[in-house]
Amino acid sequence: MNETVLVVDDEERIRSSLRGILSDEGFRVVDTGNAPGVMDLIASENPAIVLLDVWMPEMDGIELLRRIKAEQPGVPVIMISGHANIQNAVAATKLGAADFIQKPFSVSGLLSSIARALEGDTAGPRASSAFEMDAGPQAAKRAAVRAGAIPQRTVARSIVMGGQGLHTGLKTGVILHPAPVGFGIVFSSLADETAIPVRLENVSDTGYNTTLSSGGRSVRTVEHLMSAMHAFGIVNLLVKTDDEVPALDGSALEFCKQLNEAGVTEQDASVEPIRIKNTIVIGDEGAGREFIKLEPANHLIIDYTLDYPKPIGVQHVHFELTSPEAYTREIAPARTFTLVSEFRKLTELGLGNGGRLDNLIIVDDEKIVNTVLRFPNEFARHKVLDLIGDLYLLGRPLHAHVTASKTGHSDNLTLVKAIHESING
């Protein structure tokens, strides 16, 4: 028997359209505009999946979702809405929705969402933690792969987080979905499913954050999420968000915690890390000068020097990316920081509107204003966090020794461009 899809929507034209699309794909379709009768239909029709409208005249779709997950937790539910926003998507996903898509939806987007939900929202065998490796044949396969390439990875299940954008100041959120082999890391909106692949040519701004743009749409402040992806070796991921990735506490720590809880799965394909053969220098190398240098190495090594006026002063960090644990322990907790004078400048530029006492470190001429540092050199560690994220704009892990002094996002992008040119001729 064909798998059954239950469509719950008060608009007949939507139900009719979905009947046609899904029937053509081989599904058996049952539909209703009667929200109070949905639980009886689930019991009698045993659907493989439910497509549920958020706005129902007789019953709130979110409340109906809550009831379905309480009484029939094994039935995946995809929420659909004509007025979607990331806050609604985050709320629905936290309640157990498999996905959240906006009307009018594309056929390909709808079918991809259904396929992902029917596969159990995984892209392979579930790891019990982000750091666990399987035993047996899989372990042998991975050991062989590590002689050169490394396994492609994605998240084992969807991750959802809500927060506020550091620069827009708007409530936002992010939903991380597993993605298949060769997919890459792609940012997508709920509204129009505009796809922004993580590629060098899609970087549009590196002033006070890293922004990706494509098709008339932009996503700000991707660097902290990208940094965590680099550390965990995730190369395939669908990221649904609005115009800015949430700042959370100004670090990458919550991303790491969520990745560890959800699990990271290794896929049946490999990716070649970028290995540097020749030294690359951007800027004027020398003590106290602004420069960034790249040299060959067997894994990512970073030596960073920060030089700010007091009370920050000169700070040094040496970090080697040998495991997700090392990154989570030594780099991920380091938070964004700003000087009071810089914060005023950001405000004049229309940025920094989401800066709060709990999502960045504020420094005036004499002291840290709002918090206690997590590390004596937390400022330099955050620069390393940003650098690891910006380097992942290359789309795959980098094995090299980076030495940087007094650099930021713009310098990082210049280096990334130089790396791209060196490996692509």
Image: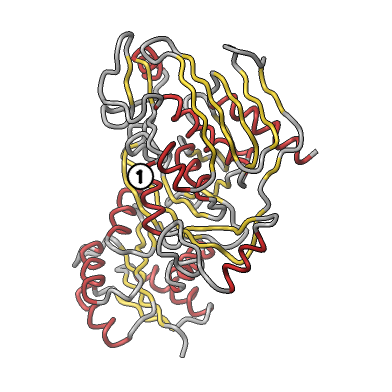
Disc 1 marks which residue?
A: 254
Q: Nearer the viewer, residue 378 or 268?
A: 378
> Which picture quadrant has residue 13?
bottom left
> What colouring method underlies this structural image?
secondary structure
Q: On the picture, is 236 further left or further right than 242?
A: right
> Which picture quadrant has residue 345?
top left
Q: Is residue 104 above or below residue 173?
A: below
Residue 280 place in picture, x, y as percent: 72, 28
Q: Residue at the bottom extreme?
A: 1
Q: Nearer the viewer, residue 212 or 146?
A: 146
Residue 133 place in picture, x, y as percent: 50, 63
Q: Nearer the viewer, residue 383 or 399?
A: 399
Q: Residue at x 67, y 63 (%)?
A: 144
Badge 1 local density, few (<14 within 10 Å), some, or many (20+)? Answer: some
Q: On the picture, is 288 further left or further right than 360?
A: right
Q: Nearer the viewer, residue 295 or 244?
A: 295
> Which picture quadrant has residue 11?
bottom left
Residue 142 place in picture, x, y as percent: 61, 63
> Callout 1, which amino acid?
Glu
Q: Is residue 336 above or below residue 34?
A: above
